[in-house]
Image (spheres, rainbow, N blue to C red):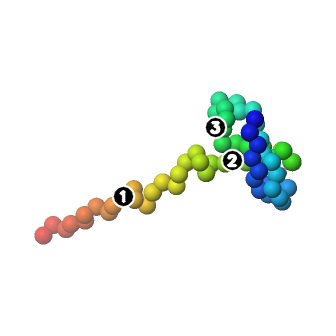
Amino acid sequence: MSDRELYCDTCEGVQPFEVPPCPDGHGVDCPELLCTGCGTAVLIATFAFQPTRLADRRRRPSPGRHAA
Ligand SMILES: [Zn+2]
Ligand SMILES: [Zn+2]
């Protein structure tokens, strides 16, 4: 049982959050946390995914070369 302190919008302050029983089998890696103050569930996805460089993967426009 790991507690983390995060800002809770509902409580309008920093509250200890705890990992809820996860039905998805994430275990301690579950990105969901429950505010112990109000019970609001929040996702902490910051570590789960990194902002990938989607900009680098955008499709290039086709060469668009006109027949000479
Ligand atoms: Zn989970
Ligand atoms: Zn709260």
Going by the numbered disc 1, the residue's amino acid type is Arg
* Mark 3 within 8 Å of ligand 1, using the beta carbon: yes
- Labels 1 and 3: the sequence-earlier one: 3
Numbered disc 2: secondary structure: strand
> Nearer the observer, disc 2 or disc 3?
3
Q: Which residue is mark 3?
A: 29
Above-or-below relation of 20 to 60? above
* Image-based side of 14 in relation to 23, left or right: right
The crowding category of the residue bearing disc 1, from other C-alpha atoms within 10 Å (few below 14, some 14 to 19, many at least 20), is few
Marks 1 & 2, CB-CB < 8 Å contact: no
Residue at the image point whose x is 81% and y is 56% from the top: 14
Please give the label number shown on residue 43.
2
For the residue pair 27 and 42, the one nearer the viewer reads as 27
The crowding category of the residue bearing disc 3, from other C-alpha atoms within 10 Å (few below 14, some 14 to 19, many at least 20), is few
* Image-based side of 38 in relation to 44, left or right: right
> Nearer the observer, disc 1 or disc 2?
2
* Mark 1 within 8 Å of ligand 1, using the beta carbon: no
Residue 18 position within the rendered picture, expressed as x and y whole percent measured from the top left: 77, 41
* Mark 2 within 8 Å of ligand 1, using the beta carbon: no
Residue 11 position within the rendered picture, expressed as x and y whole percent measured from the top left: 85, 55
Q: Is residue 40 visible?
A: no
Which of the image's four quarters has the N terminus? top right
Above-or-below relation of 38 to 13? above
For the residue pair 6 and 59, the one nearer the viewer reads as 6
Going by the numbered disc 3, the residue's amino acid type is Asp
Q: Which residue is mark 1?
A: 59
Residue at the image point whose x is 74% and y is 39% from the top: 2
Above-or-below relation of 50 to 67? above
Residue 27 position within the rendered picture, expressed as x and y whole percent measured from the top left: 66, 32
Q: Is residue 6 visible?
A: yes
- Labels 2 and 3: the sequence-earlier one: 3
